[in-house]
Image: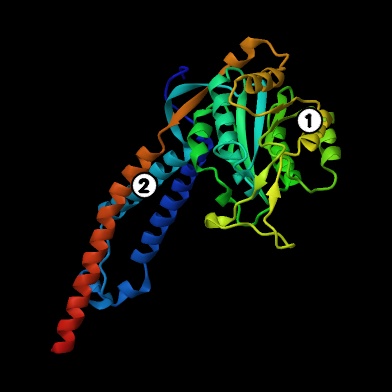
């Protein structure tokens, strides 16, 4: 076999051909027993079809059917064996720098204390990060009461870029801002990467969290090599949180709910995670600092050039041949059933 030539992925399926000799012997044995049956003592061979309603197959016809079904069996085994030829070179997913973005899409991100809103500013920050990025593989998780994986860690940042316009606070059926679950989901994504990979998180939020144990959890992640960087979105003065469909969001005290950037909590999270804290603005310095801090891989640059072969499977060719050979058999059976029905109908009328 040449490196690019025809071969089978699972050739062991051809052991199924060993079933054909026992079946052939059984058919020959059954035909011999039928020919020597006791019924032939009471009627001549040419009268048997009139007595039994069936006719005996000629030897050539009987074995012709056997070889026809054997061909179908061979095609089925060939498809299961996985014929393949030709391949595509694919670059291996090697250890490197990986960054999962945690985007807060809770209702407080609709506050307009930064124009046009906190969420719009956060989407702009992610877009700038993708445009400037040349080193990192990126992933994206949007979270509110529950996290949603928008994109796993990938080299194709275009998929994340295309999904940004669809990210809104309407993704969350239940309002809230639960960062702990988002951290767990992000760790699941990062744990699936090669162990030598550099793993980082980027939290983009206004810091409106009310969960116990956040700092301890972030410190635990930093202890296993997952650093947390933070981009704060909003202002210290804050603003009123809009409700759904333009209504006001009213608190339990009857007053409109207000939200301000909790910079102290976000800075504490970044410090516990061994990362950077930056406040989001329209300049490029904040995203550039995050990208530089996340690109901490100690691997040689040529490690990402290793490639593997993805073979082109052609199992569908024997499957199509099998279907083409089976189709006339079903059509013939349908005509036989129709003809039998017409004979019964004529007899009932007679």
Q: Say if 113 sits above or below 69 in the image.
A: above
Q: Say if 91 sits above or below 263 in the image.
A: above
Closer to us: 25 or 151: 151
Q: Quadrant of residue 251?
A: bottom right
Q: Name the residue under label 1.
A: 270
Q: Which colour scheme is used?
A: rainbow
- In percent of width and height, residue 182 lies at 70, 43
**Disc 1 residue crowd, few under 14, some 14–19, many 20+, Cα 10 Å:** many
- In percent of width and height, residue 100 lies at 66, 32
User: Residue at left 33%, top 64%?
Assistant: 35
Secondary element type, mark 1: helix
Q: Earlier in the sequence, mark 2 or mark 1?
A: 2
Q: Say if 10 sits above or below 307 in the image.
A: below
Q: How many marks?
A: 2
Secondary element type, mark 2: helix
Q: Distance between the residues labelled 2 and 1?
A: 65 Å
- Is residue 204 visible in the rendered structure shown here? yes
- In percent of width and height, residue 98 lies at 66, 26
Q: In which quarter of the image is residue 217?
A: top right
Q: Mark 2 points at which residue?
A: 72
Closer to us: 257 or 293: 257
Q: Say if 231 sits above or below 136 in the image.
A: below
* Cβ atoms under marks 2 and 1 closer than 8 Å: no
**Disc 2 residue crowd, few under 14, some 14–19, many 20+, Cα 10 Å:** some
Q: Image check: 114 left or right of 67?
A: right
Residue found at the far left of this picture: 350
User: Residue at left 40%, top 61%?
Assistant: 30
Numbered mark located on residue 27 in the image: none
- Is residue 9 visible in the rendered structure shown here? no
| Quarter of the figure with the C terminus | bottom left
């Amino acid at each position: 076999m040449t490196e690019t030539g025809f071969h089978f992925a699972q050739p062991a399926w051809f052991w199924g051909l060993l079933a054909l000799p026992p079946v052939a012997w059984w058919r020959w044995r059954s035909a011999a027993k039928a020919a020597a049956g006791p019924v032939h003592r009471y009627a001549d061979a040419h009268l048997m079809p009139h007595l039994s309603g069936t006719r005996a197959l000629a030897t050539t016809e009987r074995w012709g059917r056997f070889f026809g079904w054997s061909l179908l069996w061979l095609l089925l085994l060939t498809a299961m064996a996985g014929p393949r030829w030709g391949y595509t070179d694919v670059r291996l997913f090697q250890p490197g720098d990986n960054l999962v973005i945690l985007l807060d899409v809770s209702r407080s991100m609709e506050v307009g204390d930064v124009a046009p809103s906190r969420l719009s500013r956060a989407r702009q920050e992610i877009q700038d990060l993708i445009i400037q990025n040349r080193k990192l593989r990126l992933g994206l998780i949007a979270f509110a009461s529950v996290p949603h994986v928008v994109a796993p860690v990938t080299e194709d940042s275009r998929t994340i870029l295309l999904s940004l316009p669809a990210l809104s606070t309407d993704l969350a059926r239940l309002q809230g801002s639960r960062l702990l679950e988002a951290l767990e989901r992000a760790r699941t994504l990062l744990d699936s990467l090669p162990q030598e990979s550099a793993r980082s998180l980027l939290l983009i939020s206004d810091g409106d969290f009310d969960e116990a144990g956040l700092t301890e959890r972030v410190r635990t992640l930093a202890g296993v090599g997952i650093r947390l960087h933070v981009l704060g979105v909003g202002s210290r003065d804050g603003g009123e949180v809009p409700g759904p469909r333009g209504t006001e969001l009213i608190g339990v005290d009857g007053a409109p709910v207000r939200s301000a950037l909790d910079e102290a909590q976000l800075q504490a999270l970044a410090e516990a995670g061994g990362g950077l804290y930056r406040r989001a603005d329209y300049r490029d310095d904040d995203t550039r600092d995050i990208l530089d801090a996340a690109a901490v891989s100690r691997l040689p640059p040529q490690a990402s050039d290793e490639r593997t072969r993805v073979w082109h499977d052609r199992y569908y060719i024997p499957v199509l041949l099998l279907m083409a050979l089976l189709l006339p058999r079903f059509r013939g059976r349908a005509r036989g059933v129709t003809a039998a029905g017409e004979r019964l109908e004529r007899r009932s009328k007679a």
